[in-house]
Amino acid sequence: QVQLVESGGALVQPGGSLRLSCAASGRFSSINTMGWYRQAPGKQRELVATITTGKSTSYADSVKGRFTISRDNAKNTVYLQMNSLKPEDTAVYYCNADVRISLGVSLNSWGQGTQVTVSQ
């Protein structure tokens, strides 16, 4: 019913930058909050950043000042600009969206994930 497709993951050197994208498609009336999460090997999935429909943002302390979340409501797409990357940013990054299917019905959806590896 709703598909979230991430792209942009790659291998990058410490100090480098990457931009992740996540596009939503399917049958829905609107998208509320969108966000990025990540999961490193052996660790729990953690919140990275979120953005509301009105473009209010929040960030994990570990990425503040380095990552920027944004969205294009017309394209149903959320982005994550990641600068000054560190090896500890290595993880699978997942897109998440609170999607309004119809009046009173919402669905929390996840993408399939995109790998980000920060290494020399």
Image (cartoon, helix red, strand yellow):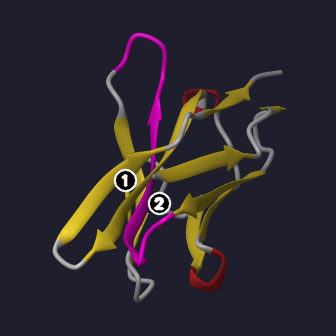
Badge number at residue 61: 1
Q: Name the residue located 55 percent from the left edge and 34 percent from the top edge.
A: 112
Q: Position of residue 47 (x, y in %)?
A: 36, 46
Q: Position of residue 12 (x, y in %)?
A: 82, 34
Q: Indicate whether 28 appears above or below 110.
A: below
Left-right relation of 47 to 64: left
Contact, mark 2 vs mark 1 (Cβ under 8 Å): yes
For the C terminus, the quadrant is top right
The residue closer to the viewer here, 116 or 21, is 21
Give the SS element for disc 2: loop
Mark 1 neighbour class, 10 Å CA radius: few under 14, some 14 to 19, many 20 or more: few
Check residue 40 for magenta coloring: yes
Q: Position of residue 116 (x, y in %)?
A: 68, 32
Pick the front one: 24 or 80: 24
Left or right of 76, for residue 60:
left
38 and 74: which is toward the camera: 74
Q: Secondary structure at mark 1?
A: loop
What's the amino acid at mark 2? Lys
Region of the chain picked out in magenta, as a range: 27-43
Identify the residue at the far left of this view: 104
Say which residue appears at 57% left-offset and 34% top-offset. 113
Q: Position of residue 90 (x, y in %)?
A: 60, 28
Is 87 contained in the magenta span?
no
Task: Check the image and report above or below for 96 versus 99.
Answer: above
- The residue under label 2 is 64
Residue at 63%, 47% (x, y): give it.
5
Q: Name which residue type carries label 1.
A: Asp
Residue at x 41% of width, y 78% of height: 29
Label 2: how many Cα within 10 Å (few below 14, some 14–19, many 20+): few
Give the camera-side residue of 34 and 120.
34
The disc label shown at residue 17, or none: none
Disc 2 versus disc 1: distance between alpha carbons? Answer: 5 Å
